[in-house]
Amino acid sequence: MKATDRSCRDIVFLILFIVHFGGIAAIIGTSINQKPSAEDYQGFMPYNWTAGDISHFISYFELIGLLVISSFVLSALYLFLLKTFTKPLIYLGIGFNIAVFFGMAVVSGIYGNYASAVITTIFGVFIALFYFSIRSRIPFAIEMIRSVVEIIQNHPGTLVTSFCSILVQFFWVCLWTFALFLSQRLSHSLVIVSSIFLLFSFYWVSEVIKNVVHVTVSGVVATVYFMGDYVPHNPTLGALQRSLTTSFGSICLGSLIVSFIKTLRSLVRMARSEQNSLLLCLVDCLLSWIDALVMYFNHYAFCQVAIYGKTFIEASKSTWRLFKTAGLEAIINDNLVDGVLWVGVLLNGLVSGLIGIGLSFLIFGHLESVIVFFFLGFFIGFILMILAMQVIDSGIACMMVCFAEDRNALMRTNPTLYNELCRTYNIY
């Protein structure tokens, strides 16, 4: 994208995204003037807070704050380990994926579900054979992970952007819940219409928030890839600005497609809960496949948006051409990388859970409610690590697109990495 070309892409969908908040405002404005029913306050009882209650409440906030800090530290530690011990961690991820299926087979056999045990065993064998057949791709995945982790470590603003997105998401969930609560005061027909609209809105805004982070991270990786040592100061801020201006309409369009499919899936599942027919089951299965394929395709299409500033349609065409030439390599690389990332997520969750138990003893002086504090720590560590690993995932996808489309640029900006990627890429 030329430096002077800053016009907003897909501006119609940017306007549509903004206008749709008017629908939410209309629901809130119409509902808030309606007289609340008795059910709105059912179970609500006034509570008189004591000094002890307030002190206990503050202690919980201290515990949560310490868990968040420890999760940040663990995330940074795993990034260091991921860069230093990439190969062992990839094999650990492969072993973990295989072990999940055989573990499910054992559990199914213990509970007498032999059909499930046989099926999961077959899947486990198939996965093991798949990884064995692509073992020559592992060196390329190792170099990809190392290079992207180094970029993320040099530009921690990418991680900050991802972590800040959860605050935006939290604010959105609060607003959405408020609108949904008020909409129940409307007439029956309006409740149905407003609920469907709010369901779609929830998915759309959530997807936009997630994809803004993805496009921002991809923009940073692309900047480093094409500019090398001449990267401008704070490229994360520049990439974020492009995501929220030039490319925001394209993000809204791509997110709109996914949100529409997810809304249909939710409606079909609601219908299945009322009437679990074979047709609805087949439709749900079909939509789940379409949802997964579209999300995977969009993941790479948004890389095109970030790298070249294309409209979403142009990015989709380029992505389709890329998949026809290098799609298999991208899929294989993603399978190798995903295992490593999920190992980090689970390890961070487990260690954070243990830290939660220890902190609860230090703060409260007892080990009561051990399970509660473990799962609190696990949840916080799990979520924060997912945000960090999504940054790595976005960076690797962007690096794959850049390398597949313009290897010569990397030869100019980083000859060492270029030689390593070419050497490992041409092994197979």
Image (cartoon, rainbow, N blue to C red):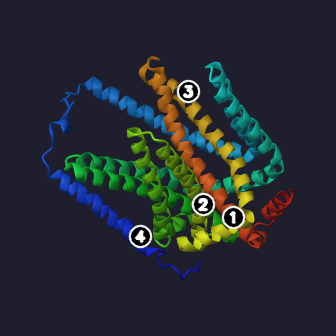
Q: Which residue is mark 4?
A: 14
Q: Distance between the Cα atoms at labels 2 and 4?
A: 21 Å
In the rendered structure, which disc, 3 or 1, sits on the residue that comes first in sequence? Answer: 1
Q: CB under 8 Å between callouts 1 and 2?
A: yes
According to the image, label 3 marks what residue? 354
Where disc 3 sits, the SS reads helix
Image marks 2 and 4: residues in contact by CB distance under 8 Å: no
In the image, what residue type sits under mark 2? Phe
Q: Give the camera-side residue of 399 and 4.
A: 399
How far is disc 4 from disc 3 in space, using C-alphas?
Answer: 44 Å
Q: Residue at x 40, y 39 (%)?
A: 273
**Foreground: 217 or 393?**
393
Please tell me whether mark 2 or mark 4 is closer to you in this view. Answer: 2
Query: Would you name the residue on which mark 1 appears?
Result: 323
Q: Who is closer to the viewer here, 233 or 248?
A: 248
* Label whose residue precedes the other's in the sequence (2 or 3): 2
Mark 2 lies on a secondary structure that is helix
For the residue marked with disc 3, what is the amino acid? Leu
- Label 1 sits on a secondary structure element that is helix
Q: Earlier in the sequence, mark 4 or mark 3?
A: 4
Crowd around label 3: few <14 · some 14–19 · many ≥20 (10 Å): some
